Amino acid sequence: MSEPQAGELSVKRAPAISWSAVDGREAELVLRCASGDEVACAALVSEHQRMVFQLGLHLLGDQDEALDLSQEVFLRVFRTIGRFRGQSALRTWIYRIAINQARNRQRWWKRRHRSEQVSLDEHVQNHGDLPSTDAGSPEMALGQKEVAARIWHALDRLPFDQRTAIILREIDGLSYEEIAFSLDVAIGTVKSRLTRAREALRAQLREASRP
């Protein structure tokens, strides 16, 4: 069977091999999507679109860019889902596609907006607040907002691969194994990137806190 052309949905079914990382429901969903089942495709998007959008927002820092990225990701998912073999959970496979698309998009984004300066308030508006407990008083809420803004500002200054690793680990809660698959690197590389990212963040936050 010939490979699908750009813009076409692959209809090649995965062979009967091990789907060790995919439960029965997901395996069925993948096969239905690969066969062009529109209901299944809509269900897949519904289940994963928030995850993809939030990841795009965290990596790119712009809501419009995150929306565009989401569309690109799901187009890519449906063009290549016939090649999915259960080598990871479906969610992790989609993470991998989203990260690759975000990496390409952020290169263009940085070139276009290299000279723009963004305020701390704009960082929080673009990225959203970091996960936190109940802020309590208005003063505490304001303090948390300022901390979140400084953290996002520091994250934006990290190299893309370090920023991605720490977002996947600390915000999205992925395991080392899931991050390694999503980034297509060894687990040791994930750990070293996380170490360097944390060290860089601590240094930047110390510098930002100086009077």
Image (cartoon, rainbow, N blue to C red):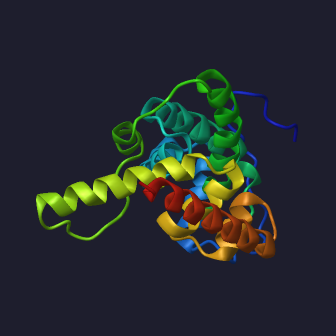
| Relative to 81, 23 lies left or right | left
* 160, 210: nearer the viewer: 210
Residue 117 in view: yes
Q: What residue is drawn where x is 30% and y is 54%?
A: 145
Q: What residue is drawn where x is 59% and y is 62%?
A: 203
Q: What residue is drawn where x is 88% and y is 37%?
A: 2
Q: Position of residue 119 (x, y in %)?
A: 40, 36
The quadrant in which residue 148 appears is: bottom left
* 72, 45: nearer the viewer: 72
Q: Height in image: 92 above or below 81?
A: below
* 130, 150: nearer the viewer: 150
Q: Position of residue 45 (x, y in %)?
A: 48, 47
Q: What residue is drawn where x is 75% and y is 63%?
A: 85
Q: Position of residue 153 (x, y in %)?
A: 49, 47
The quadrant in which residue 189 appears is: bottom right
**Quadrant the C terminus occupies:** bottom left
| Relative to 37, 19 lies left or right | right
**Quadrant the N terminus occupies:** top right
* 34, 127: nearer the viewer: 127
Extreme-right residue of the structure: 2
Q: Height in image: 51 above or below 18?
A: above
Q: Position of residue 95 (x, y in %)?
A: 61, 55
Extreme-front residue of the structure: 211
Residue 48 in view: no
* Number of numbered discs visible in the structure rendering: 0
Q: Height in image: 146 above or below 88?
A: above
